[in-house]
Image: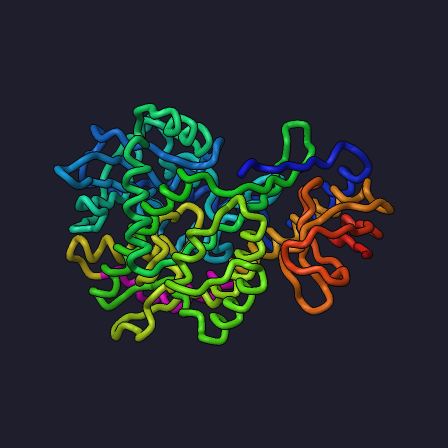
């Protein structure tokens, strides 16, 4: 599906928007700048001894264009009728001293925040965008997972080792998708093949993927802001399968060792399933057979009813959290959408918890005791990640609300067309095509999800991020 982008033109509204976004960042108590002691420690930190030398392997990274905080690099090759997948992760545990100032500041932040006018990083940029980042054409320490896959994409064996690597290419999603569509050879040539096999394995497990369109605020070189709404490219989904495979491997290592932190999500209860079935029937696309993951995966993305169905399905993807253990493994270890035990272990530059997962997995793989600092702080992680997750959600939603209000400011007093994507009581969530805005509005009489309605823009408050509509 083509992306849609709407711009906030330079004007008084643009000035007001810039002030609102700056105030929003200040309200989060997550400053972009780091204390001097944290910067000094980061600059002086030395990587752990790398162990293996894997610089002869042509790794490549795949991220949004222009990214500098590169957590993962991959290398894919055939192995008989199967495949070998190497997945290198930035060796953040090797750079960060437990109990040091960088560690303490990272625990306070929890994760990198992506604001409209720049990132609020988890670690100082000398680490996250330079010395620990898997940038191309420089030697970098990494934690390398090596997977042996059979012809169906099933993991037959895997291992984790500390190594020195050298990425040969920094790929971006759009260019890589275009190259794959043209049939070009390159570092990602096997990614569609391996990704499709892993998606097939996900189907067999009963896994589910929501794949709602992304809404992202983008700042142009001229200082204007826009909202970009798009569906993920296939190459993004294939790439995500490498990360999911690694997270499942990390979870299995920790479960076997009796110590770890898992990302869990409960199965939807029968009441939630019944409500979702009723909604699909009302939308004319009834879910009657099979698992809900298969049903969602087979929806036609060009069908106007698909977006309302995906919005309704969001109620099935709730309750995600973290569970820690040091001894008996908890009875509930599964991430229901993945349909397997799973751990966050592939984004240590951007997410705090991954450093603990990787430290545990490396110790287990090397036959060592899990470090004391991990055991002492493991139980603190769920609360730290919950707090940072709430902060990130507030930033994302408030930023989009402010930009949407700025987009609607020139239309106050006029009428716009919108599509109803969800109904809640007497109000509806509607999606306006131009400008690209998703908002809450009064429910017009007789409107149901999928209906096209006409709304009058009554008010747009950029500072508060509010838009008011009337039927």
| Nearer to the camera, 280 or 211 | 280
Q: Position of residue 53 (x, y in %)?
A: 19, 34
| Nearer to the camera, 360 or 373 | 360
Q: Residue at x 30, y 59 (%)?
A: 205
On screen, residue 445 versus residue 137, left or right, reads right
Residues drawn in magenta: 370-386
Q: Is residue 127 visible?
A: no
| Nearer to the camera, 294 or 366 | 294
On screen, residue 113 versus residue 236, left or right, reads right
Q: 226 above or below 383?
A: above
Q: Position of residue 79 (x, y in %)?
A: 15, 37
Magenta stretch contains residue 372: yes
Q: Position of residue 408 (x, y in %)?
A: 77, 44
Count of picture labels: 0
Q: Is residue 310 visible?
A: yes
| Nearer to the camera, 272 or 78 | 272
On screen, residue 126 versus residue 192, left or right, reads right
Query: How is the structure coloured here?
Result: rainbow
Majority secondary structure of magenta residues: helix
Q: Position of residue 334 (x, y in %)?
A: 34, 66
């Amino acid at each position: 599906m083509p992306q849609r982008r709407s711009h906030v033109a330079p004007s008084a509204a643009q000035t007001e928007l810039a002030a609102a976004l700056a105030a929003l960042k200040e309200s989060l108590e997550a400053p972009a700048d780091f204390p001097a002691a944290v910067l000094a420690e980061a600059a002086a930190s030395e990587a752990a001894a790398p162990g293996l030398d894997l610089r002869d392997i042509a790794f490549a990274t795949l991220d949004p264009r222009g990214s500098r905080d590169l957590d993962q690099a991959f290398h894919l090759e055939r192995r008989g009728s199967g495949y070998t997948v190497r997945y290198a992760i930035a060796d953040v545990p090797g750079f960060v001293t437990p109990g040091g100032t960088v560690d303490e500041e990272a625990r306070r932040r929890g994760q990198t925040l992506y604001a409209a006018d720049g990132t609020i990083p988890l670690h100082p940029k000398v680490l996250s965008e330079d010395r620990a980042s898997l940038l191309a054409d420089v030697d970098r320490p990494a934690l390398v997972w090596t997977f042996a896959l059979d012809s169906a994409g099933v993991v037959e064996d895997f291992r984790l080792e500390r190594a020195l690597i050298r990425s040969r290419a920094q790929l971006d999603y759009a260019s890589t998708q275009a190259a794959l569509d043209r049939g070009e050879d390159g570092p990602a040539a096997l990614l569609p093949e391996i990704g499709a096999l892993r998606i097939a394995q996900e189907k067999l497990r009963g896994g589910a993927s929501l794949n709602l369109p992304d809404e992202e605020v983008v700042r142009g070189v001229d200082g204007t802001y826009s909202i970009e709404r798009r569906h993920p490219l296939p190459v993004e989904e294939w790439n995500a399968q490498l990360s999911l495979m690694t997270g499942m491997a990390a979870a299995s290592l920790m479960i076997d060792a009796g110590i770890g932190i898992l990302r869990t999500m409960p199965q939807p209860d029968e009441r939630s399933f019944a409500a979702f079935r009723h909604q699909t029937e009302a939308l004319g696309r009834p879910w009657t057979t099979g698992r809900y993951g298969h049903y969602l995966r087979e929806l036609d993305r060009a069908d106007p009813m698909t977006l309302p169905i995906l919005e309704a399905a969001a109620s099935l993807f709730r309750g995600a959290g973290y569970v820690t253990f040091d001894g008996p493994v908890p009875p509930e270890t599964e991430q229901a959408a993945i349909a397997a035990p799973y751990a966050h272990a592939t984004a240590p530059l951007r997410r705090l918890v991954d450093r603990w997962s990787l430290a545990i997995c490396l110790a287990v793989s090397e036959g060592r005791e899990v470090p004391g600092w991990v055991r002492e702080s493991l139980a603190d992680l769920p609360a730290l990640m919950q707090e940072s997750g709430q902060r990130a959600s507030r930033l994302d939603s408030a930023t989009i609300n402010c930009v949407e209000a700025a987009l609607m400011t020139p239309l106050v007093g006029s009428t716009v067309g919108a599509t109803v994507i969800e109904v809640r009581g007497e109000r509806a969530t509607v999606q306006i095509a131009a400008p690209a805005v998703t908002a809450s509005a009064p429910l017009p009489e007789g409107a149901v999800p999928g209906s096209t309605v006409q709304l009058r823009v009554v008010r747009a408050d950029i500072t508060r991020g509010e838009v008011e509509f009337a039927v």
